[in-house]
Amino acid sequence: MSFDSLGLSAELRRAVAEQGYTEPTPVQRQAIPTILEGKDVMAGAQTGTGKTAGFTLPLLQRLSERQINGRRPVRALVLTPTRELAAQVGASISDYGTHLPLRSAVIFGGVKINPQIEKLRHGVDILVATPGRLLDHVGQKTLDLSKIEILVLDEADRMLDMGFIRDIRKILALLPKDRQNLLFSATFSSDIKKLADSLLNKPVLIEVARRNVAADSVDQIVHTVDRKRKRELLSFLIGSQDWKQVLVFTRTKHGANKLAQQLERDGLSAAAIHGNKSQGARTRAVANFKQGEVRILVATDIAARGLDIDQLPHVVNFELPNVPEDYVHRIGRTGRAGHEGEAVSLVCVDELKLLRDIERLIKREIPKIVVPGYEPDPTIQAEPIGGKRQGGNQRHDRGRRAQGNNANTSHAKRKPSRKSSGAKGASADGTREGTAAPRSGRKPGKPQATSHQRRTASSQRGERPSLLGGKR
Ligand code: AMP
């Protein structure tokens, strides 16, 4: 099936062709004709499915079918949970709308408000916004939402997770009753269903990926390792397998900063993004990562939301997330739009319960592989992990989800013999990238096995991957 049969105008088909897309994705096949008919939509589609084009293309078409003379009111509003996602959606609207005479703007917090006011004053057809800054504009009377024809809630589950429900309700109260509503969400909790019931009018349901099921195009692996050797193993994996572009998740802002600095010291170029970094610093880090100037981007869950990097080959969970759904979001950053990807989780003894919760959620067991030389020490006891989910408070913390202690800062007793063992791991000793040697007797320079080969070798040796004791 090509884009020609979806009812899109020649201008939009041309823009799609310029993006290099030849076939619509499943969510696009279902959403585009439905939205063009003016119906409300509730779509269960996770990041990476092409959902942005799924709503942007028909939205652009519907607005362009009726031109407004004189001063332009805002006619379409896209709400997103994060600045990054807002910027991504804004970029998609510019790309797909390039041959149409429509104007769009993106507004989010953390940057000056005046340029946004100036832009709004000149007239904007489509506005992409995060809820907080949108309400700031409403408060300053620099924005009128009374002419909205189409509302999109993108990653609605994230918005609720981040405590935006009250802001969303305030915004909904400012919109005209007669409008088209499109709700996109990766998961459907009871809160999302409640929101959908109050918002949508006889919605068409579109579900392209089963709820909470990780994309099949992502090869998932767990490497069990001691908590204090995770950084070393990460450097080793990146160096020995020559990974060029890796997105690494940590649980905390502090952990992200610390890890990026340590990787830099290992000779691997790295940058960290998290909520405490200025918008400028985050944008720069992402741009450098996309262009290949920075090899490793270390991010917290919130900061990474909405990142869209084409064909990202590797995602690493340096620490498992406290919330199992975040695992699905994290690994959704790889294996996007038909490309294969690999998601590697470094799991220490403290995280076994988190791992079990994740496996229960995704309804599959993730293969566990011990990297030779990084066998977990069976004498190390599990320790509590900081940064538990914030329960009731979470709904009101405006995205400032608790950033607990980094598991790496805990002080487990380790066997002294390991510390003094021969070769230094990875590039801790300044070993150049790509020639890192593991702690085991494996020779530097010898081609290292890919994760798939390691897995195969491990099962051929009849080793049962073990979380606690390495090889049994
Ligand atoms: P999304 O799920 O909207 O975040 O999109 C994920 C990625 O898929 C983005 O990099 C898009 O540029 C890309 N994409 C969207 N539609 C298509 C398509 N029909 N064919 C190939 N790639 C696409």
Image: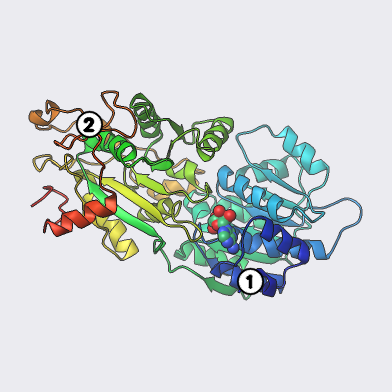
Give the side of residue 249 with respect to residue 292, left or right. Answer: left
Q: Is residue 169 something that shows in the picture?
A: yes
Residue bearing the label numbered 1: 2
Please, is residue 48 above or below residue 298 in the view?
below
Q: Looking at this view, is 70 or 96 the one in front?
A: 96
Q: Residue at horizontal 34%, vertical 63%?
A: 362
Q: Residues at badges 1 and 2 in contact (C-beta under 8 Å)?
A: no
Mark toward the start of the polypeptide (1 vs 2): 1
Residue sitting at x 39%, y 47%: 315
In percent of width and height, residue 383 lies at 19, 40
- The residue under label 1 is which amino acid type? Ser
Question: Is label 2 in a helix, a strand or a loop?
Answer: loop
Q: Residue at x 29, y 28 (%)?
A: 427
Q: Quadrant of residue 3?
A: bottom right
Element class at badge 1: loop
Q: Residue 214: x and y, percent? A: 39, 61
Picture quarter with the N terminus: bottom right
Is residue 155 visible in this depiction of the protein? no
The one of 102 and 211 positioned closer to us in this rendering = 102
Given the image, on which type of amino acid does mark 2 rest?
Gly
Whole-percent x, y for residue 154 in the image: 58, 57
Give the colour scheme shown: rainbow
- Looking at the rendering, which quadrant does residue 298 occupy? top left
Number of disc labels: 2
Mark linked to residue 317: none
> Would you say 378 lies left or right of 179 here?
left
Give the labeled residue for mark 2: 425
